[in-house]
Image (tube, helix red, strand yellow):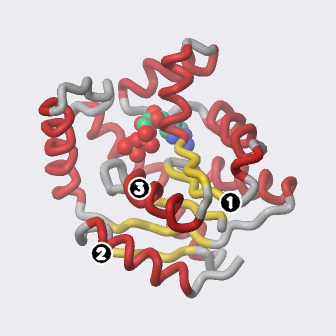
Amino acid sequence: MRLVLLGPPGAGKGTQAQRLVDKHGIVQLSTGDMLRAAIRAGTPVGQRAKDIMARGDLVPDDVVVSIVSERMDQPDARNGFVLDGFPRTVAQAEALDRLLDEKGQKLDAVVELKVDEGILLKRIGTRLGEMQARGETARPDDNPASFKIRLDAYRAQTAPLVDYYGRKGKLKSVDGMAGIDAVSRSIDGALAGASG
Ligand code: ADP
């Protein structure tokens, strides 16, 4: 099973991706996580991405496309994957199409989590409070100013992918505002009808 999860920051992509991993025995490919790992490791990619990410802007397409391509070639991704946070621009979606073609693979579906942006702002506040309560350090981009830039980037650069995948007949939209279990059930239902 090869999936893309689409939705604005804070929509619950990471949570649902983890559930899809457990259910289908696939791997989660989160470009956000990969970039944060690169920053921690101090690699050249990490050094390029660090300040851009803290602001909430998008890292250049060529950087993320190459890390995704490498990751897709790892043995554990052979059985399938759920992309979380990628593609985020039309150029990235086109690059993904080319990568899949080259690798002889196809996407089964693109799942869009539809959410209300006003409620997202509350969610991000709650996530921050919970992390602080656990004594964890918040992500440098989990602050209101960067979050607004992330939402703007989503609207301007990522939301057009809803049409892009709609035209290809790959799009499955689910209500992302329900509880975590209810959202998972909607995704399962949407995928039951999906075929490569
Ligand atoms: P969220 O979905 O909550 O915004 P992510 O962890 O997916 O969080 O992304 C955090 C940041 O990482 C983004 O704001 C951006 O700077 C960078 N990033 C992640 N994925 C991509 C991507 N596909 N293209 C460009 N930048 C990305």
Q: Which amino acid does label 2 sit on?
A: Ala
* Left or right: where 45 falls relative to 74: left
| Residue at which label 2 appears | 182
Name the element at disc 1: loop
Alpha-carbon span between mark 2 and mark 1: 24 Å
Residue 193 position (above or below residue 56): below
Sequence-wise, the earlier of marks 3 and 2 is 3
Task: Give the quadrant of the N terminus.
Answer: bottom right
Q: Sort mark 3 into few (<14), some (14-19) or many (20+) by Cα contacts within 10 Å.
A: many
Residue 64 seen in the figure = yes
Q: Sort mark 2 into few (<14), some (14-19) or many (20+) by Cα contacts within 10 Å.
A: few
Residue 156 position (above or below residue 145): below
Whether the residue under disc 3 has CB within 8 Å of ligand 1? yes
Q: Which amino acid does label 1 sit on?
A: Gly
Residue 89 seen in the figure = no
Q: Nearer the viewer, mark 1 or mark 3?
A: 1
| Residue at which label 1 appears | 80
The quadrant holding residue 110 is bottom right
* Left or right: where 168 falls relative to 154: right
